[in-house]
Image (cartoon, rainbow, N blue to C red):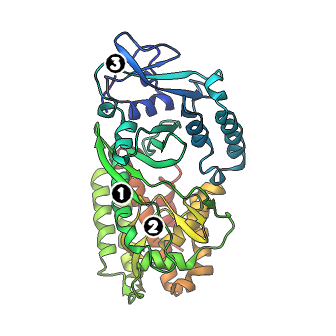
Amino acid sequence: MTAPAGTAADPRSRADGLGWVTRAVFGDERIGLAVDRPPPPGQRAVARYAVVPSVRRARFLLPLGAPRVTAAALLAYNALRPPGVRAARAVLGGLARVGALDRAPFPTLTVSLPAGLAAAEVLLAQRLAAALGGGPGYAACGVRPPDPNHKPTLQLFAADGRPRGYAKIGWNGATRALVTAEAAALRELPALAGVPGHPAAPRLLAETSWDGQVVALVEPLPPAVRGLPVGAPPAIPALLAVARRGRPPAPPRPLAGSGFLARLAGTARRAAAADPAGARAVAAVAALAHRYGDTRVEFGHWHGDWVPWNLGRHDGRLVAWDWEHSAPDVPLGFDLAHDAFQRAVVLRGEPVAQAARAVDTRLARYGAALGLDPAARRLVADAYLVELWLRAWRLADAGAGWNPALHPALLDAVEHRRSD
């Protein structure tokens, strides 16, 4: 991203979430940004945003001057949000509908450009609106604390408030890889729309490079999509459809000699060359090969982040989004294992060792429906935990830093399970 010189009123000079997001979205130094100040001499204002609720505690950048858009930015997909967040957004959205946010005492971020500079040349939202066609667009942006594993996102709207797209911005090595991977996955999914049981997914609308970043523009979710109850049982037919992609069940193959095991081993060796902890991963992969080399399992695709907050239901059909970790040729059952692990760690706040046991429990209960016998269930659980640590290493090595919930506790849990 281009580093702007900034002024005291320019949020790009800040070290917090507002600074991180504005550097990603308004990185070109020709763009003027000022909070509660007019544009500098020689520049014209091209957009205004309410900084909600304040500069210091910013959570949203909401477009001003188009009440229906401002309301839509707050109310779109509100049914997917936790009750407290949903209530707060509903109140703000109601105020926005009648134009009250334009008069509310929120700080105002003014975006300005030099005379003669086309907005679509330097403003990401306008470049994306041009790619979509159909006239100018408006953008809203959530603000969260800076995190090297997170991606700034833009919600794009038409002037009447209709959602038009959702843009993810890959800004460092880790997030560029994730955005690129999701774009690749979404390009393939329309061909699977007719596969019985396969979840619906948003279409990829555009992929572009922008100021050193990678941007994927994704179709909006259906407006009436609803989240799944957290306690809902796993959608086994959907998991099988994702894994098999419309093909008949593949014959189970031994772990030894599989492309999956070779890929794990190669990644572990790269980790060992870059980080002392990687030697433990090499040992973990070798232990997998020794313990389960003759164990047969079906291999197929996985979504890669199959969790309740990435799933919903619309018009009687399951909908899945956030495909950035999707990949082929993994043991069938990885998505079921991931769902159990993440529920334990994220929703219940359990330590990694306890989450690993939750994986065992979930596979024991539902694994037979996936065609997994007891030996295959143990293979899936242990291989998934090694795969998850290697994912954490790949993100750390690409600049995202270690996820403290997973490292080093996950390697400790893997080694402890070897001694059981």
Residue 277 in view: no
Which residue is more in the foreground, 153 or 114?
Answer: 114
Question: Could you tell me residue 83's position as x and y percent?
Answer: 72, 49
Disc 2 residue type (three-letter): His
Label 3: few (<14), some (14–19) or many (≥20) C-alpha neighbours in 10 Å: few
Label 2: few (<14), some (14–19) or many (≥20) C-alpha neighbours in 10 Å: many
Residue that badge 3 annotates: 5
| Quarter of the C terminus within the rendering | bottom right
Residue that badge 1 annotates: 183
Residue 22 in view: yes
Q: Secondary structure at mark 1?
A: helix
Question: Could you tell me residue 50's position as x and y percent?
Answer: 56, 27
Residue that badge 2 annotates: 303
Q: Does residue 46 lie above or below 83 as drawn?
A: above
Left or right relative to 55: residue 398 = left
Left or right relative to 349: residue 399 = left
| Quarter of the N terminus within the rendering | top left
- Nearer mark to the viewer, of 1 and 3: 1
| Distance between mark 1 and mark 3 Cα atoms | 33 Å
Instruction: Looking at the image, tell me whether mark 2 or mark 3 is earlier in sequence order.
Output: 3
* Tag of residue 274: none
| Distance between mark 2 and mark 3 Cα atoms | 41 Å
Q: Residue at x 28, y 39 (%)?
A: 212
Q: Secondary structure at mark 3?
A: loop
Q: Residue at x 63, y 80 (%)?
A: 365
- Nearer mark to the viewer, of 2 and 1: 1
Q: Residue at x 34, y 63 (%)?
A: 187
Q: Residue at x 60, y 66 (%)?
A: 313
